[in-house]
Image (tube, rainbow, N blue to C red):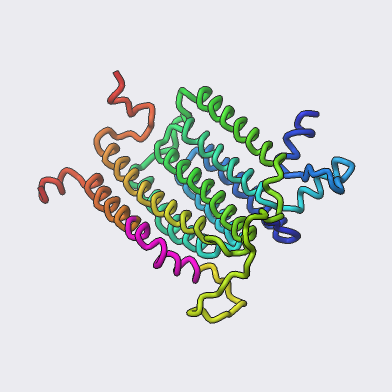
């Protein structure tokens, strides 16, 4: 419990750890961190969504839900790209390549759409042959 | 980059909603429920994009993902006709997969702890970057009420990154042809060779 309060909560709520005008009590630290959303919050959100997607890919049995988890992971990466694009825009005040992160996000969306189309085509072809979409019954190449 | 006040509250609402929807999506029993929850995750993510002034990405997210990809997913679920799975949601490697995910989560938390400690993420700009006012392109009328995001992204897409843009369209063409080839039936193969 002490570990959670002292280590995990400050990471999740992004409490400022800087020594200048540091709030004294833990409650003040948490309140200051709560209403001060900076880029670390976006990183934490992206990491959590990515981990949930990884868990879905590694544990689910329905291959369509595995594909949806992959889409979720790509979406988590897109959050990182857009947040860093805005961060870079504000850091350089729009002088050096301010929109490249968002343009890369567009390409990630394009590739995700293409991947979903081809993957769903493979799923349909397999279902037509074997009448199943459970990944532990797709074991034709297992010897 | 700091969001303050009502934007911070909105960020927390959208983030908590996205994480909850994602957890429910991964653990849903019915595949159609899972698809609808993924739509909810994508829409809340589009809201987060709006918070960081990426309006074009938010619109493209809703148009492409929700309007295109997820409709395709729901069609495939309908065609494959998956019943509610008979008490076996997860594979036999559930514990191994959970342990691997736990290790990954631990690694990410360690990395986030380091970024928290480093002063790299302070708001102060690095000293070696020249801070000049961004010049408006002469073609654009300076209307400051409207966000310049979509205009600028369109300009970049048709000037500097025009070649990757065309390559992306080629990728989409190949994907369309491949999907049609993969998903056609035996009867159609006999007819068309």
Residue extending farthest to the top is A143
The image position of residue B105, as x and y in percent, is: 60, 33
Q: Which residue is drawn at 40% across and 67% down?
A: B159
Q: Residue at x 81, y 48 (%)?
A: A31
Q: Report if residue B165 lies within the magenta region.
A: yes
The image position of residue A47, as x and y in percent, is: 59, 41
Q: Which residue is drawn at 38% across and 27% down?
A: A136
- Drawn side of residue A27 relative to residue B60, left or right: right
Q: Report if residue A131 lies within the magenta region.
A: no
Observer able to see residue B189: yes
The image position of residue A79, as x and y in percent, is: 56, 51
In this rendering, the answer to whether B84 lies above or below A39 is above
- Point out the stretch of residues depicted in magenta: B151-167
Q: Which residue is drawn at 32% across and 25% down?
A: A139
Towards the viewer: A17 or A78: A17
Question: In the rendered picture of this protein, how many numbered marks are placed on residues?
Answer: 0
- Drawn side of residue B56 relative to residue A120, left or right: right
Residue extending farthest to the front is B128
Quadrant of the image occupied by residue B1: bottom right
Residue extending farthest to the bottom is B141
- Drawn side of residue A10 relative to residue B126, left or right: right
Q: Main secondary structure of the magenta part?
A: helix
Observer able to see residue A1: no
Towards the viewer: B52 or A117: B52
Quadrant of the image occupied by residue B22: top right
Towards the viewer: B38 or A99: A99
The image position of residue B157, as x and y in percent, is: 42, 64
């Amino acid at each position: 419990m002490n570990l959670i309060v002292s280590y995990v909560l400050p990471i999740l709520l992004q409490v400022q750890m800087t020594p200048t005008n540091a709030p004294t009590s833990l409650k003040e630290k948490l309140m200051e961190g709560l209403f001060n959303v900076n880029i670390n919050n976006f990183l934490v959100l992206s990491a959590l969504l990515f981990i949930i997607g990884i868990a879905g890919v590694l544990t689910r049995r329905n291959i369509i839900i595995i594909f949806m988890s992959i889409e979720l992971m790509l979406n988590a990466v897109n959050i990182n790209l857009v947040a860093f694009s805005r961060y870079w825009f504000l850091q350089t005040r729009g002088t050096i390549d301010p929109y490249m992160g968002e343009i890369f996000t567009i390409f990630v969306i394009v590739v995700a759409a293409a991947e979903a189309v081809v993957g769903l085509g493979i799923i349909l072809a397999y279902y037509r042959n074997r009448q199943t979409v459970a990944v532990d019954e797709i074991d034709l190449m297992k010897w | 980059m700091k969001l303050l006040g009502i934007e911070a509250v909105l960020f927390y609402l959208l983030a908590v909603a996205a994480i909850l929807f994602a957890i429910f999506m991964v653990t849903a029993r019915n595949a159609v429920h899972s698809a609808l929850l993924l739509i909810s995750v994508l829409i809340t993510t589009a809201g987060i994009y709006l918070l960081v002034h990426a309006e074009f990405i938010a619109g493209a997210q809703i148009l492409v993902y929700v309007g295109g990809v997820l409709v395709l997913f729901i069609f495939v679920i309908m065609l494959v006709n998956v019943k509610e799975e008979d008490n076996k949601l997860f594979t036999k490697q559930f514990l191994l997969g959970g342990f691997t995910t736990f290790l990954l989560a631990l690694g990410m938390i360690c990395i986030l702890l380091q970024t928290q400690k480093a002063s790299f993420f302070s708001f102060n700009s690095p000293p070696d970057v020249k801070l000049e006012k961004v010049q408006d392109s002469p073609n654009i009328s300076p209307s400051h009420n409207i966000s310049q995001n979509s205009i600028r992204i369109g300009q970049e897409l048709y000037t500097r990154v025009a070649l990757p843009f065309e390559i992306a369209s080629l990728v989409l063409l190949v994907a369309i042809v491949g999907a049609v080839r993969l998903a056609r039936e035996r009867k159609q193969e006999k007819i068309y060779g």
